[in-house]
Amino acid sequence: MAENAGPLLAGRVALVTGASRGIGRAIALALGQAGASVACAARSTDQVEAVAGEIRAGGGRAAAFRLDVTRAEDIAAATGAVAAGLGPIDVLVNNAGITMQQKTLDVTDAEWDTILATNLTSMFLCARAVAPAMIARGWGRIVNIGSMWGKVGVPRYAAYCVSKAGVDALTRCLAVEWARHGVRVNCLAPGYMNTDFPREAMADERTRNLILAKVPVRRIGEPEEVGPLAVYLASPASDFLTGQTIYLDGGQTASW
Ligand code: NAP
């Protein structure tokens, strides 16, 4: 079984959006450890450079790219630069995302548009930018980072929940359209993870206890726990899996 001898992602090039911190950073590090050449992309250039540096310090191959996923021209420039610098993109991890808590009646047009542009339209634009080369080579992996909140209704989070439900639908549509070209598209949907995202809610003891009471394993996840699943979804091992949303949530969406 010589082909299993090397790291799972040896020779693959992966682009991770929102790799400057949190879940994206953890995924970038995990992909790098699995042997991929990793393009770490986000708006905070110092932070993505630091993440790429961590991968290189561990013996991996990585480079940092400035990317605002709400800007189509940035996506064209960054994906072109990644292909030129590291090689054709085999794996796209659409991770960049933002959230906002706001009574739905107070959400402005601009706020709604920003959430949808950052969390959903960006994933379509990035996938559309990288898929032609994947299709031409007959192999590709797209991992969209969704959320358990794409499955449920949460008061004051309408734009976020809608954006993540859209990520589920986008995942299914791209998966069935590109399956015959060897491109697999799946959605990795985390529950509460220990990043800047839910930090404010977790800082309040009453809210934290309410949240933990809903999670069967009675803790929130660590970003590092997302890495192995992302590596699997990025790898040849997941060849028969496509169009699925996988919840990494300590059992929360399985609970009554
Ligand atoms: P985070 O720590 O706040 O990180 C968000 C990342 O997205 C940062 O790297 C940020 O980079 C990037 N980003 C935001 N807007 C961007 C833009 N316009 N262009 C490029 N990059 C942008 O959040 P996280 O918890 O790691 O969240 C990552 C993903 O997981 C999101 O899609 C989120 O919806 C999802 N998720 C998180 C949780 C959770 O509890 N943490 C749960 C479910 C789903 P820059 O600011 O440097 O650009």
Image: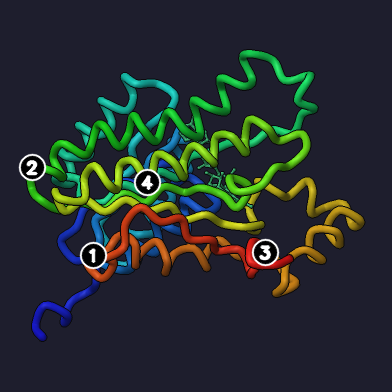
Spatial CA span between label 2 and label 4? 21 Å
In this image, 18 relative to 174: left or right? Answer: right
Q: Earlier in the sequence, mark 2 or mark 3?
A: 2
Q: Residues within 10 Å of mark 4 (few under 14, many from 20)?
A: some
Q: Residue at x 40, y 56 (%)?
A: 244
Q: Position of residue 6 (x, y in %)?
A: 18, 77
| Circle nearer the viewer, 1 or 4 | 4
Distance from label 1 to label 2 (Cα)? 17 Å
Q: Residues within 10 Å of mark 3 (few under 14, many from 20)?
A: many
- Residue tagged 3: 252
Give the x, y percent position of residue 50: 43, 49
- Camera-nearest label, 4 or 3: 4
- Find the distance from the CA under tag 3 to the CA under tag 1: 27 Å
Residue type beneath disc 3: Gln
Q: Nearer the viewer, mark 1 or mark 2?
A: 1
Please give the name of the residue rendered at 54% of the width and 61% of the height, measured from the top-left corner.
Answer: 247
